[in-house]
Image: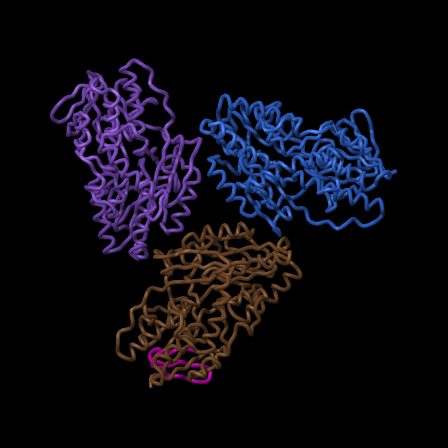
Chain colours: A purple, B brown, C blue
């Protein structure tokens, strides 16, 4: 019986575990290791911050998903991986694997910038359920006691979408509450220009966001790295200071410590086009944990985003490659990675597509419309339904 | 009987006088002092320059407005105000007041720039009836003997709308006359970017004007201060020279000398939110005479515009505050000042709204359409009708 | 019998010869000298490169056009002009003229930049039938073996339209073939900004091309001069290097050597508004051979384009002036030169109009639509039909 260990219980880990179980049935023993017993539909965290979703609306128990499929779940953090001995260590045990799938997401590296982060620092964040709940509370204070809000991304971030969404959503909510004129909204970013998004833009995304932000009077500060954050202001490396009452700042991303030694200096793991480790052939890495070189050097370093959509696709590709490996057949041909993103804009939404992810591209566009909002809301329900029923072979 | 003196016979002065009479009836003696016996509907002066209005179309006798309402009119320039003794001096007399309303508009400070202005200099101007009549003559010469036209604003200007309008109107008129290719049109401004308008822009106004001017091939020179003007060219502080045959240049604004000692170094008078002088509690100041701090420092200093629309609103707020003061009640709560502006664009027009005037704002937009032109033309008739009949309690 | 010699057998030369024959009938002996026995409808060369036209579709024999009209054709290159003796020299003969019409087009000055050009260098070109055929072959290689494509214009170019067209067409063709993501498309130009086109832009052409290129992810490098070209890369004067697999680079333009001594240092010939040489009154010059001063100095020097449409108009104006000169009457009044250009955009097209050619202008616009594509295709057929039948008195 092939022993497959999956690190991570979010989009990538769960999809890989379900897909491997589906493909291999009883031939494989699939074990998921994660320190979080909840699956959170992360794309809805901005809505949770805004008060438009409660935690229960967008979470599922991991066990509830895996148990009916006969997948083991160990609720512990992985401590490390020994790639030569093919073993994963946790606080209490050691697990051997024939194949390892790493889908551990990012390590939110708040420590790199003094004063950053919701725990030891002065800024909020939208990347985990707990952070989002806390940010939602700060947002409530802003509604009662308005003041400047800074939304943005520090250097080395590789996920810009939620920040754009929050800027649009806060604008919309403040307008509805007739408070917009009491809250200066500032979008601060390490991107070299608005709409870069870590992928050198998508078609006319620069002008799209410039126009939308100008129209909504969301002030923009691009191409900046953060030096430090005090309780009252963000200090940029260029010396300027931005006062805030709420600062939702995405921190630098790194690989999580348990798997970082398998990767590059920032801990992202190099893979081939089947997401197989370039050196350790029985290790696969998908999602944010995996390394993609940026499309172009930028004055302030930024990373390439890997959306939930992309991660799910990677999970299927990696699972198919493991299946082929076990069966001794060639892995199925893979199409190039593309990104389809539904970006909420408060009262509207936009569908962004880039295929492949990085330029030059066969296709890339941004289309705005209320239909994109309906799609986004529907997809949330659909994905949670799919997960709840352990379905991995639907788009 | 309360003695109320109003300095100024334009939008603010007349509205304040009529409104105070309406509120206080025979309890107050209201006196208007102005050296001009005509009320000019200033927003139509660009049309007068273009030959689309005659002076009679857009002027009313001040006496004709005030007499039926029992308001006294002294046709003299104020020489000075003694705030401690509550007295206004003119060339021939001295008038004591219980309340003073200052609505003296701007002092057009041509002297600050050598060669500027229609009297001692070489440039034209659109801010008074006489200036506009003279500019209209220069414009006729241009139509007969075409050459480069520069329209714009010097440093310390706080009224940009008419310059934008003239640029659009001249373009439209030249096209109609098939002369556009003989007249280079240059828009020269102290604004840091097109569409700033002294209020840090309104929504996407930067792109709006950039697109409109590019489309109409109106050349743009932004962020400039003028050093001096010779009969043939405008010399900028950065050393460049702009030749012209007609130069319609708005001069630096200051407070008028008679009231300037009550104000800041440039003579603009500091007020609270009821337009009450921050020191002399029986003096109120409305319109351009009043001080508003700019929304952001700009490389070349510019001021915040106060439109006729805003000035009328200020007149009503100040009148209500005086009424409350006399009655010993609290002044009615005031909404924040907003601006609604109908900007003529020659063959079309645009409605611009900023609420409040300065960012951050609850609302701000620019909408272009022929309906805005109809609105603008209708409002001119409506306002003149309202003034002629001494009506101050309609919007 | 008046002897009229026409140098050049393209748009200008043929139109002038036909028009002079039509006006003067048997009073004149008209001789065309050209080293090319084919007339090529040059605006369709980008389509030939793309494989959308064959050479036969867009060429006519010069003899086939001229013989039925009784116009002589000498198929030889002109060696020189002696303006004092009114003689043209070719390799084999010497021809005296009473009037000379020069319509020799540009000399493609590849030699000014090491490594430039399809003969001695490493770049392709679209300005002659032979060059376009060769570029078409390189393009086929790109489709089989994709790699970066650079399209653009060196310093001193005065014809930008075909480069814009090729960028759009290649994008469209690559999309159709699902190869777009394998071919980085770069538009490299000496224009100071996108859409300048040597005429300081036309209306909002800057934003039009910026938006279109951003939308299509055609990377843009503006305001550049080329230092040299190696087999693998273009080296710019600013030190940057652009790798390519296909580089379609328009070379600097000069006057052709045989007539250059009659012109300015770059060999373009100065004329009055009837296209008459400013010194030699029996010499007329039309089309690219003629000198037009640029509308404004640019950081990298560029020239004013003369389209086929403009050249045909110049040919008629010059012919009318020669006719008047012979008849001893005043030349008919001439309207200012305007440009109407149908620019192919692959799946669509745009109509661009500038009237007059250089700013300030009475009219200028860019309108995009499929109707412009139909117009462009129809006009090709119409013009070739007109030429084939020796018709010069239709628009």
Answer with left or right where residue B8 lies relative to residue C33: left
Q: Is residue B297 left or right of residue A62?
A: right
Residue C205 seen by the camera: yes
Which residue appears at 53% of the width and 67% of the height? B45
The magenta segment? B78-99
Residue nearest the observer in this picture, B287 or C202 = C202
Q: Quadrant of the N terminus of chain B?
A: bottom left
Measuring from the top left, give residue A294's x and y in whole percent.
37, 31
Q: Is residue B260 left or right of residue B229?
A: left
Q: Against B182, is C366 above or below? A: above
Q: Horizontal and vertical percent for residue B84?
A: 33, 79
Left or right: C321, with B375 as reference point: right
Q: Magenta stretch containing residue B87, yes or no?
A: yes
* Quarter occupied by residue A29: top left
Quadrant of res C319:
top right
Determine the residue positioned at 36% across, 35% down.
A340
At horizontal 42% and vertical 65% (from top left) the residue drawn is B306
Could you say which quadrant of the image residue B360 lies in?
Answer: bottom left
- Residue C28 rendering spot, x and y as whole percentages: 85, 38
Count of labels in the image: 0
Q: Which percent across, then down, holds residue B202?
A: 41, 55
| Residue at the extreme left of the image, as rendered | A92
């Amino acid at each position: 019986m092939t022993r497959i260990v999956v690190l991570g219980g979010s989009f990538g880990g769960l999809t890989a575990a379900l897909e491997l179980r589906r493909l291999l049935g009883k031939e494989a023993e699939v074990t998921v290791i994660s320190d979080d017993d909840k699956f959170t539909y992360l794309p809805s965290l901005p809505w949770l911050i805004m008060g438009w979703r409660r935690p229960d609306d967008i979470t599922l128990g991991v066990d509830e998903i895996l148990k009916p499929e006969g997948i083991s779940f160990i609720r512990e953090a992985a401590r490390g991986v020994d790639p030569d001995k093919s073993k994963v260590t946790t606080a209490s045990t050691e697990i051997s694997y024939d194949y390892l799938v790493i889908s551990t997401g990012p390590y939110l590296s708040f420590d790199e910038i003094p004063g950053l982060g919701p725990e030891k620092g002065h800024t909020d964040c939208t990347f985990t359920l707990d952070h989002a709940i806390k940010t939602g509370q700060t947002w409530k204070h802003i509604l009662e006691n308005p003041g400047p809000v800074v939304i943005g991304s520090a250097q080395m971030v590789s996920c810009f979408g939620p920040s754009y969404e929050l800027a649009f959503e806060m604008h919309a909510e403040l307008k509805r509450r007739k408070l917009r004129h009491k809250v200066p909204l500032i979008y601060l970013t390490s991107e070299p220009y608005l709409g870069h998004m870590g992928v050198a833009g998508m078609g006319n995304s620069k002008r799209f966001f410039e126009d939308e932000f100008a129209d909504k009077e969301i002030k923009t500060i691009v191409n900046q790295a953060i030096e430090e954050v005090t309780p009252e202001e963000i200090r940029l490396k260029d010396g300027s200071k931005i006062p805030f009452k709420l600062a939702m700042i995405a921190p630098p991303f790194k690989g999580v410590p348990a798997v970082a030694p398998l990767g590059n200096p920032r801990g992202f793991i190099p893979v081939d086009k089947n997401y197989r480790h370039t050196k350790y052939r029985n290790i696969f890495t998908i999602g944010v944990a995996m390394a993609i070189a940026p499309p172009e050097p930028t004055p302030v370093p930024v990373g390439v985003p890997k959306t939930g959509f992309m991660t799910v696709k990677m999970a299927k590709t990696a699972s198919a490659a493991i299946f082929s490996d076990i069966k001794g057949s060639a892995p199925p041909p893979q199409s190039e990675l593309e990104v389809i993103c539904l970006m909420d804009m408060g009262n509207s939404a936009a569908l962004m597509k880039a295929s492949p992810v990085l330029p030059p591209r066969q296709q890339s566009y941004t289309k705005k419309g209320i239909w994109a909002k309906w799609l986004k809301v529907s997809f949330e329900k659909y994905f949670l339904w799919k997960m709840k029923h352990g379905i991995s072979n639907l788009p």
